[in-house]
């Protein structure tokens, strides 16, 4: 849902820029950065600034498929087996990227 809202906001913003014939590259980049900041704020606010543990735990469990978020949950709940599995998974991903970019 978050991505649909971001797409709609960006579409309306760039349509307005086109309608008013604003072709300045700096303004287009500024609008893009503002939209990007809004989208990331929704994610980062929950992870970084949330003080209600129940809400944070629900967010982390909802994003359980993302190893970066699940790592936080597993560390907080001392699920050592999952921490080791996620660490190995993330290391394999990183090693694969490094190996493929070296070629």
Image (tube, grey):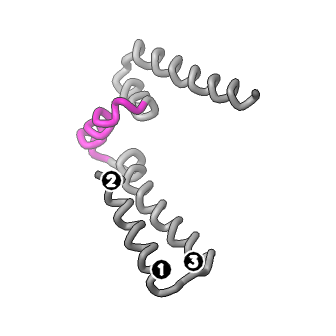
The mark that comes first in sequence, 1 or 3, is 1
For the residue labelled by badge 1, is the local secondary structure a helix, a strand or a loop? helix
For the residue labelled by badge 2, is the local secondary structure a helix, a strand or a loop? helix
| Left or right: 75, with 2 as reference point | right
Q: State the image quarter where residue 55 is shown.
A: top left
Q: CA distance from mark 2 to mark 3?
A: 24 Å
Disc number lying in front (2 or 1): 1
Q: Position of residue 51 (x, y in %)?
A: 32, 47
The mark that comes first in sequence, 2 or 3, is 2
**Residue sitting nearer the eye, 92 or 16:** 16
Q: Position of residue 96 (x, y in %)?
A: 62, 24
Q: Which residue: 62% across, 75% down?
A: 25
**Residue sitting nearer the eye, 57 or 63:** 63
Q: CA distance from mark 1 to mark 3?
A: 9 Å
Instruction: Please identify the quadrant where the C terminus is shown.
Output: top right
Q: Position of residue 9 (x, y in %)?
A: 37, 67
Q: State the image quarter where residue 101 is shown.
A: top right
Residue on which the image places disc 3: 27
Report how many numbered discs are placed on residues in the image. Answer: 3
Q: Tell me the magenta residue range.
A: 51-66
Q: Which residue: 38% across, 72% down?
A: 12
Residue on which the image places disc 1: 17
Residue on which the image places disc 2: 2
In this rendering, the answer to whether 42 lies above or below 12 is above
Magenta stretch containing residue 56, yes or no? yes
Q: Position of residue 62 (x, y in %)?
A: 28, 36
Q: Residue furthest top?
A: 81
Q: Are marks 1 and 3 in contact (CB under 8 Å)?
A: yes
Q: Which residue: 64% across, 29% down?
A: 97
For the residue labelled by badge 3, is the local secondary structure a helix, a strand or a loop? helix
């Amino acid at each position: 849902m978050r991505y649909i809202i971001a797409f709609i906001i960006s579409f309306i913003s760039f349509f307005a820029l086109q309608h008013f014939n604003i072709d300045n590259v700096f303004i287009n980049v500024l609008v893009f950065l503002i939209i990007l900041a809004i989208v990331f704020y929704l994610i980062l606010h929950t992870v970084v600034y949330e003080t209600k543990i129940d809400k944070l735990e629900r967010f982390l469990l909802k994003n359980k498929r993302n190893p970066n978020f699940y790592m936080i949950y597993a560390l907080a709940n001392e699920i050592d087996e999952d921490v080791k599995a996620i660490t190995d998974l993330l290391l394999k991903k990183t090693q694969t990227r490094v190996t493929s970019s070296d070629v």
